[in-house]
Structure formats: structure tokens, C-alpha cells
Image (cartoon, rainbow, N blue to C red):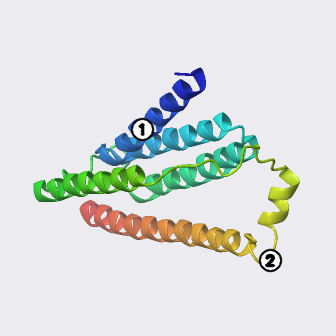
Amino acid sequence: MSPATIIFYIISAFILVTGLLAVTTRKIFRASIWLLFSLIGIAALYFWMQLEFLAAVQIIVYVGGIVVLIIFSIFLTIKSGEEMPKPILIRSIFSALAVLFGTGFVVRIISLYTFKPISTTAFNLSVNQIGTQMLDTKDFGYLLPFELISILLLAAMIGCIVIALKSNDKEATTFQNSIQ
């Protein structure tokens, strides 16, 4: 086994373990931190594939933007140290069965597919080509999805602030009633 293959397996295991911890931990703040590590692992996978620009975008957008937004949302809406309620046993059983059947299905599909190299030459993407493609408004351009995602993030942040303000109003009313 080559060193590159070993590095790939280490990075993949790191992504899978941190992703699993992100969805199974009962503390929501810890879940967001595990998500952060999982996204950093994906950036490491991009670095391993020598796609430095995509790795930098992964770190800036997802690690620096999305996870920070999630953490701020957690602090605005709920108490970060509280544990989430324990899942109902039947939901845990159905989740485990769904994971098992899904994994079996994916393994079956992959085993039936014959992987052949499309090209023997490495693809060469310059930052200029990537930037032109992202800002293109014609076919296969990505300007509209970027604008829609920015509106979605803005709406999510406004929603978190509204929820935080409502809970603060309830706490203030409860506090005022307890004083009187």
C-alpha cells in the first residue's frame, strides 16, 4: 500500500469519525465543533487531491462562515451547555436500520460498477478558470446559486435573531413577574 493511499484512508476515517460524532453527541455545541472538524477533514481531502483553491474555499466558506453562523445561532437561541433530549428507542432502531440498509445499497451499487479511468492526464484548473465559471451567468455558471445561498444564510440568521428575541421576551416577562 502506497503512502498516498494510507493518507487517504486516514483522512477518510477522520471525516467519518468526526461526522458520526457530530450527529450522535447530545450536546449541541459539541456537535457543531465535531462538524467543524469534519469540514476541516474535507478540506484536507482537497489538499490531498492537490486542489488547493477548493480547499481554501472549503475552509473560508464552510469552516469560517457556516460553522461560525451555526455556533452564533446556538448561542442566540438556546443554552449551549444543555444536553439535547435522549432519542426515543424506536427512532434509534429505525435510524440504525436505515444506515445499515443504505450502506448495503451503496456497497452493492459500487460493487456492480466497473471503474475505468476516463483520462490518463491530470486535470488542470486554474483559479482564473474557476472564478470565470463561478461568476458566469450563462450555461453551467454558478452566480445564481451563490446569490440564493447568501439570501438563505441571511434568512437563517434573521430567523435565529427573531427566535432569540422571543425567548428573551418570555424570560424578561417571567423575571418581571417573579420580582413582583
Q: Mark 2 and mark 1 in contact (Cβ < 8 Å)? A: no
Q: Amino acid at mark 1?
A: Thr
Residue in the foreground of this view, choosing between 115 and 59: 115
Q: Earlier in the sequence, mark 1 or mark 2?
A: 1
Q: Residues within 10 Å of mark 2 (few under 14, many from 20)?
A: few
In the picture, residue 13 is in which quadrant? top left
Residue 148 placement, left or right of 32:
right
Numbered disc 2: secondary structure:
loop
Q: What is the x, y in percent for residue 141?
A: 76, 71
Residue 137: give its label.
2
Residue 75 placement, left or right of 78:
right
Q: Residues within 10 Å of mark 1 (few under 14, many from 20)?
A: many
Return the residue found at the far right. 128
Q: What is the x, y in percent for residue 54?
A: 70, 48
* Disc 1 target residue: 18
Residue in the foreground of this view, choosing between 110 and 128: 110
Residue 137 placement, left or right of 37:
right
The correct choice, above or below, for 127 with respect to 77 in the image is above
In the picture, residue 128 is in which quadrant? bottom right
Q: Residue at the spot x=52%, y=24% of the render?
A: 6
Q: What is the x, y in percent for residue 28?
A: 36, 48
Q: Residue at the spot x=80%, y=78% of the render?
A: 138
Q: What is the x, y in percent for residue 69?
A: 55, 55
Tag nearer the camera, 1 or 2: 2
Q: Amino acid at mark 2?
A: Thr
Is the C terminus in the top left, top right, bottom left or bottom right quadrant?
bottom left
In the picture, residue 22 is in which quadrant? top left
Residue in the foreground of this view, choosing between 74 and 57: 57
The correct choice, above or below, for 110 with respect to 132 in the image is above
Residue in the foreground of this view, choosing between 85 and 124: 124
